[in-house]
Image: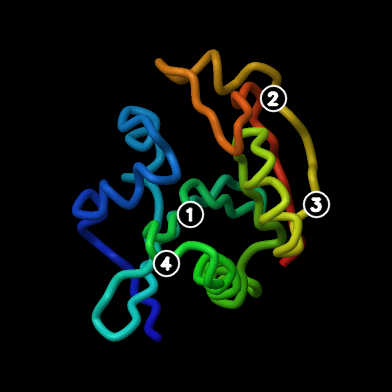
Amino acid sequence: MVFREIENKRDYLPLLLLADEQKNMIDLYLDRGTMFVLDEDGIIKGECVVTDEGDGVLEIQNLAVAQEYQGKGYGRQLIEYVVNHYKNRYKVLQVGTGDSPLTVPFYEHCGFVQHHIIQNYIIDHYDQPIFEGGKQLIDKVYLRMKL
């Protein structure tokens, strides 16, 4: 298993869209972010885009695992790679995600703790309703971990 930094991030748009369903929202962070992919035996299993938010805060903007490899620990491995890669350079790793009954517990299991919520963020910023685990996403939940 190899983690690689990617220059041509837009080449991975189909994978990025798994985690953020609207291209213009991806455009808000992609150019200023650093993208890593998890490559196993020449197959890209997942990706993670992180941005420097200032004051020692690093943010996961996009984390996606190809559908056929979900639930096999690749997302957690990407997070662990990012933590180890940046732990001596940043104080906090944060992630903002929809109030999903699937995604929020995933991040909590990876060691993140809920920090704050932006009410109505999803319905105010996305053109179409987004559903996960049978629930319409409305708010954006920020979770953090110390590095």
Figure check: 2 above or below 77: below
Figure check: 77 above or below 71: below
Amino acid identity at mark 3? Val
Amino acid identity at mark 1? Leu
Amino acid identity at mark 4? Tyr
**Which tag, 4 or 3, sits closer to the chain's start?**
4
- Which mark is on residue 113? 3
In the rendered structure, are the residues bearing label 2 and label 4 in contact, judged by CB atoms less than 8 Å apart?
Answer: no
Q: Which residue is mark 1?
A: 63
In the rendered structure, are the residues bearing label 4 and label 1 in contact, judged by CB atoms less than 8 Å apart?
Answer: no
| The C terminus - image quarter | bottom right
Amino acid identity at mark 2? Ile
Q: CA distance from mark 2 to mark 4?
A: 31 Å
Q: CA distance from mark 4 to mark 3?
A: 25 Å
Secondary structure type for disc 2? strand
Residue 107 percent coordinates (x, y): 68, 55
Q: Who's the residue at 24% across and 81% down the image? A: 42
Q: CA distance from mark 1 to mark 2?
A: 20 Å
**Which tag, 3 or 2, sits closer to the chain's start?**
3
Mark 2 or mark 4, whichever is nearer to me: 4
Q: Which residue is mark 2?
A: 118
- Which mark is on residue 69? 4
Q: CA distance from mark 3 to mark 1?
A: 17 Å
The quadrant in which residue 136 appears is top right
Q: CA distance from mark 4 to mark 1?
A: 13 Å
Q: Is residue 121 left or right of residue 111?
A: left
Figure check: 30 above or below 79: above
- Single out the residue that lies furthest toward the front: 134
